[in-house]
């Protein structure tokens, strides 16, 4: 009979000459099944000093190995009656005996985040969202929970963590973001059946020190004209299109020439009219291509002729860029095929990065004008507010902003305009023939 070879140890293969798979370092399925066959536990509470305690068996996940250890749990103060303590013990043992606490809950929090959450769950998110989540995980969650197992993140443990943030200098929005990321991690553990429940849903954040600002800053048409004049091309045209269309910066960066449309139509009088529009069906954000933010965002919106002409003008522009002591001349548009980008990087014609444009061009120009609040979101807010100033109907504004609900347009994007309110008040006098 032929041998299997001199370099193969018989302990490494199974009965039919098939070599077993290499050990990945994680517990095998058999380990989990063996640990899952837990014995029924019914220890009696004992009084130790000032506490009633209970000794139970628990499964821990340490250095890639599952181990069963015995722990002493504090149930209640020693002043509590024996019957009440027995009820607490029965309630505590119920999930252990009924299998409601899964074996996977013994997984270390940091191990789960690094080996499961980041490689499996995060790729479904936008690139910008991934970057924010990774920052929160690195700076806040790993330092706080890195050494704990998933099941150790009880409601009390999590609530204590956020309650201690009451005196933290972090803004309320930052605390809320930490809560969202933790909820996403534990929610995925529930979906993968490693946890029975996500306790973050019932956590309360500390009260805000100040009231939430309902209004968000926007720029007036006069301020906008001055801002555009102080920014070089093609970035000036980029923010021009942003304000007059309301596109998100990721949609601007992903805009292609076949998305800019001019349609000839015959009106009721038989004359030929040209209608202009932009179709939003793709977005680009820091190296990540994807579909628009929502179904409502995937739409075609009308634009003014001046916006269309401003976009087409890019094909004729050249810019001078200083390179040491020399000056290099570049065409703003390297290629204008249907699938080519409208807004291209000056040197290579590659997709633009929104944060570079903001920090190098928009922010410096805005600060010189005393408008330190200007950013990409501000330009979109300004578009919604200008629609209100122009007297646009709420549903028309919602369609132009491509929101799923009109309340988003009204409550979040359209801002209070004192001049508009004053004009409305002055018009009240026309409703009555007698003004007192």
Image (cartoon, rainbow, N blue to C red):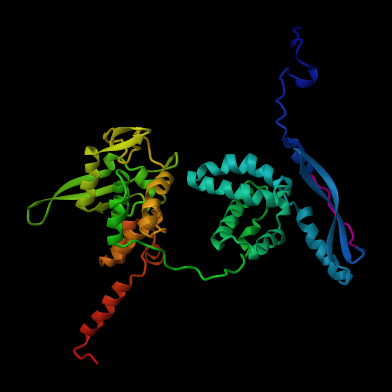
**The C terminus lies in quadrant:** bottom left
Residue 283 horizontal side relative to residue 99, left or right: left
Residue 366 horizontal side relative to residue 49, left or right: left
Q: How many marks?
A: 0
Furthest residue toward front: 325
How far across and how far down the image is residue 185, in percent?
Answer: 61, 50
- Figure check: 1 above or below 208: above
Residue 85 horizontal side relative to residue 95, left or right: right
User: Is residue 44 on the magenta stretch?
Assistant: yes
- Figure check: 160 above or below 238: below
How far across and how far down the image is residue 345, in percent?
Answer: 35, 37
Q: Answer whether residue 403 is visible to the viewer in this image.
A: no
Residue closest to the eye, 39 or 422: 422
**The N terminus lies in quadrant:** top right
- Figure check: 219 above or below 30: below
User: Is residue 424 on the magenta stretch?
Assistant: no
Furthest residue toward left: 270
Residue 314 horizontal side relative to residue 68, left or right: left
Q: Answer whether residue 351 is visible to the viewer in this image.
A: yes
- Stretch in magenta: 37-46
Residue depicted at 89% across the width and 62% down the height: 45
Majority secondary structure of magenta residues = loop
Furthest residue toward top: 1
How far across and how far down the image is residue 201, in percent?
Answer: 61, 60
Residue closest to the eye, 271 or 284: 284
How far across and how far down the image is residue 39, in percent?
Answer: 83, 48
Residue depicted at 27% across the width and 61% down the height: 222
Where is residue 25, by image quadrant? Answer: top right
Residue depicted at 56% across the width and 61% down the height: 171
- Figure check: 182 above or below 168: above
């Amino acid at each position: 009979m032929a041998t299997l070879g001199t370099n193969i140890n018989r302990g490494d293969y199974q009965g039919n000459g098939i070599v077993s798979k290499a050990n990945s370092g994680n517990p095998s399925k058999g380990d989990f099944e063996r640990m899952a066959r837990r014995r029924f536990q019914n220890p009696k509470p004992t009084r130790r000093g000032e506490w009633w305690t209970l000794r139970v068996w628990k499964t821990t996940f340490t250095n890639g190995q599952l181990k069963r250890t015995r722990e002493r749990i504090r149930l209640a103060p020693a002043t509590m009656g024996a019957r009440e303590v027995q009820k607490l013990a029965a309630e505590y043992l119920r999930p252990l005996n009924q299998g409601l606490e899964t074996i996977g809950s013994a997984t270390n929090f940091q191990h789960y985040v690094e080996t499961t959450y980041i490689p499996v769950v995060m790729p479904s998110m936008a690139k910008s969202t991934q970057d924010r989540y990774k920052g929160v995980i690195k700076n806040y969650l790993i330092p706080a929970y890195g050494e704990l197992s998933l099941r150790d993140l009880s409601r009390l443990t999590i609530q204590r963590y956020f309650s201690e943030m009451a005196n933290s200098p972090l803004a309320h929005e930052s605390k809320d973001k930490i809560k969202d990321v933790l909820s996403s991690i534990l929610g995925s553990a529930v979906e993968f059946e490693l946890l029975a429940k996500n306790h973050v849903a019932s956590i309360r954040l500390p009260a805000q020190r100040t009231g939430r600002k309902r209004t968000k800053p926007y720029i007036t048409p006069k301020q906008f004209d001055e801002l555009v004049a102080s920014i070089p091309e093609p970035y000036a045209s980029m923010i021009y299109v942003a304000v007059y269309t309301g596109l998100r910066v990721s949609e601007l960066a992903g805009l292609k020439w076949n998305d800019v449309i001019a349609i000839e139509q015959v009106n009721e009088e038989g004359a030929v009219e040209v209608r202009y529009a932009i179709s939003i069906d793709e977005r680009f954000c820091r190296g990540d291509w994807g579909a628009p933010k929502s179904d409502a965002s995937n739409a075609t919106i009308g634009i003014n002729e001046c916006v269309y002409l401003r976009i087409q003008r890019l094909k004729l522009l050249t810019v001078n860029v200083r390179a040491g002591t020399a000056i290099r001349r570049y065409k703003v548009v390297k290629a204008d095929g249907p699938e080519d980008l409208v807004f291209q990087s000056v040197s290579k014609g590659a997709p633009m990065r929104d944060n570079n444009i903001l920090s190098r061009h928009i922010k410096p120009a805005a600060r010189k004008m005393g408008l330190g609040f200007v950013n990409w979101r501000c330009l979109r807010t300004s578009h919604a507010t200008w629609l209100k100033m122009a007297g646009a109907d709420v549903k028309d504004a919602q369609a132009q902003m491509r929101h799923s609900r009109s309340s988003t347009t009204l409550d979040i994007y359209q801002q209070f305009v004192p001049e508009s309110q004053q004009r409305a008040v002055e018009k009240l006098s026309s409703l009555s023939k007698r003004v007192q």
